[in-house]
Image: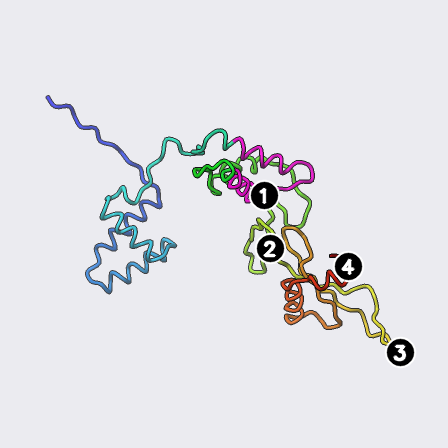
Amino acid sequence: MEPKSKRQIIEFTQTEKEKIEAVKSLLAAQDKTSYRQRQKEIAQKLGISQRSVQRMVKAWQDKGVSGLTRNQREDKGKHRITQEWEEYILKTYREGNRGSLHMSRAQVALRVEARAATLGEEDYPSRATVYRVLSGVMESQTKIIRSLGWKGEKLILKSREGIEIEVEYSNQVWQCDHTKVDVFVVDRQGEILGRPWLTTVIDSYSRCIMGIYLGMETPSAAIVALALRHGILPKQDLLQKFFVI
């Protein structure tokens, strides 16, 4: 008597069900016109590109249902790096954030790359792996750095459109600020001309002033451009003039 075959029951997520139904619907199209139209509708419904829809169809044709599902790894949630590297990442991050010091995840990743180069190792943790290792530390971190835009370990800026920008290194984001100076400018006859405007270009990460523009003109796009020009151009002549170098 032959043993009864065991049937494996697979539970699909809602997303996987939607993908399966979408591919079935697409393959049922009668002609190219309806196929393209249905492909476009599926891309909009799933919030993906039409190219991604094509990949879904190919995965279905190559592997069947398994091509649209993700198998759970037994080591899911674990970092596939050596204990030595993990300890180095955590130690570097903690030492870099002691007291008034601040070190971001990106800077830790750069330290990892530098150490790997020194040791001559080609197989070292990627930036994404470094971020995953530090994610638990960052979530449990209760220290709040009292500086504009800092949220825990991250420096996050929000644009007028509501887009959040994570600043991870110097010269990634510059900001302009306009201030009416608390002095009065007078001409040779002593007539008061008014208070000048000071436009500064500040590096968001280091808070270093990269460029300035001082003038009587009201702040505008042209003034911002002049301040940016000053920030971008070399300043050797200016430094020599004031005996800095």
Residue drawn at point x = 33 percent, y = 37 percent: 71
Q: Which of marks 3 and 1 is nearer the N terminus?
A: 1
Q: Earlier in the sequence, mark 2 or mark 3?
A: 2
Residue, disc 3: 189
Q: What element carries label 2?
A: loop
Q: Earlier in the sequence, mark 2 or mark 1?
A: 1
The amino acid at mark 4 is Phe
Is 170 magenta? The answer is no
Does the rendering let one see residue 171?
yes
Residue drawn at point x = 68 percent, y = 47 percent: 147
Q: Is residue 217 left or right of residue 60?
A: right
Residue, disc 4: 243
Residue 104, label in figure: 1
Secondary structure mainly formed by the magenta segment: helix
Is 96 magenta? The answer is yes
* Label 3–label 4 contact, CB within 8 A: no
Q: 10 Å neighbourhood of mark 1: few (<14), some, or many (≥20)? A: some
Residue drawn at point x = 15 percent, y = 23 percent: 3
* Label 2–label 1 contact, CB within 8 A: no
Which is in the foreground here, disc 2 or disc 1?
A: 2
Residue, disc 2: 171
Residue drawn at point x = 27 percent, y = 62 percent: 36
Q: Residue furthest right?
A: 190
